[in-house]
Image (cartoon, rainbow, N blue to C red):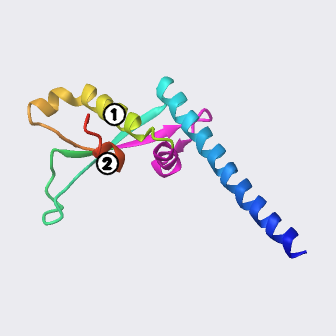
Amino acid sequence: MRFAKEATATFSGEHHRLSSRLTSAGIVGNVFDAMDEDRLKLYSREARDLSDPDRSSARVEILVRLLDRNCRLSSPADFVPAAERFVRAALLDRLIAWTALERHGSAVRTGMLSLRFNPSARTLSDPDL
């Protein structure tokens, strides 16, 4: 009986890990479909100095949301961990930065706007960045 319980626990653990990998793979697939279908939506929020929060700044943090096929927005917490797990976060980070700079590059070049990004740790350690 003990042997059967141990075997069941081992099988259940392996099944959970496999299920988790398949779910993450599906999420990453959805992210890349969203990239191809222009369903990654960029947002920004003003970054203010905490010592003077009432003073406006020209600094903005770039945020991303995924618009699913049912027109619901997903938080990065729903898809970035899967992208990191499958070593695709750097590609996602590059797309976000490229898109933001494409849209706002002229304002950045003139100093009217400063963009802030939150890339993954893998992206930050990429020598090609």
| Nearest the eye: 120 or 107 | 120
Q: Over which residues does the magenta segment extend?
A: 63-85
* Quadrant for the C terminus in the image: top left
Q: Say which residue label 1 marks.
A: 94
For residue 81, which numbered disc appears in the image? none
Q: Position of residue 64 (x, y in %)?
A: 40, 41
| Marks 2 and 1, the one that precedes in the sequence | 1
Q: Position of residue 2 (x, y in %)?
A: 86, 75
From this view, report whether residue 107 is shown above or below residue 23.
Answer: above
Spatial separation of the CA atoms under disc 2 and disc 1: 11 Å
Circle 1 crowding by C-alpha within 10 Å: few under 14, some 14–19, many from 20: some
Q: Is there any visible trace of residue 4 in the rendered image?
A: yes
Identified by mark 1, the residue type is Arg
Element carrying mark 1: helix
Left or right of 109? Residue 86 is: right
Left or right of 7? Residue 25 is: left
Left or right of 107? Residue 69 is: right
Circle 2 crowding by C-alpha within 10 Å: few under 14, some 14–19, many from 20: some
Residue farthest toward the front in the current orientation of the protein: 3
Task: Give the residue displayed 52% in from the left and 46% down from the top.
Answer: 82
Q: Position of residue 94 (x, y in %)?
A: 33, 33
Element carrying mark 2: loop
For residue 118, which numbered disc appears in the image? 2
Left or right of 83? Residue 100 is: left
Residue farthest toward the right in the current orientation of the protein: 1
Identified by mark 2, the residue type is Asn
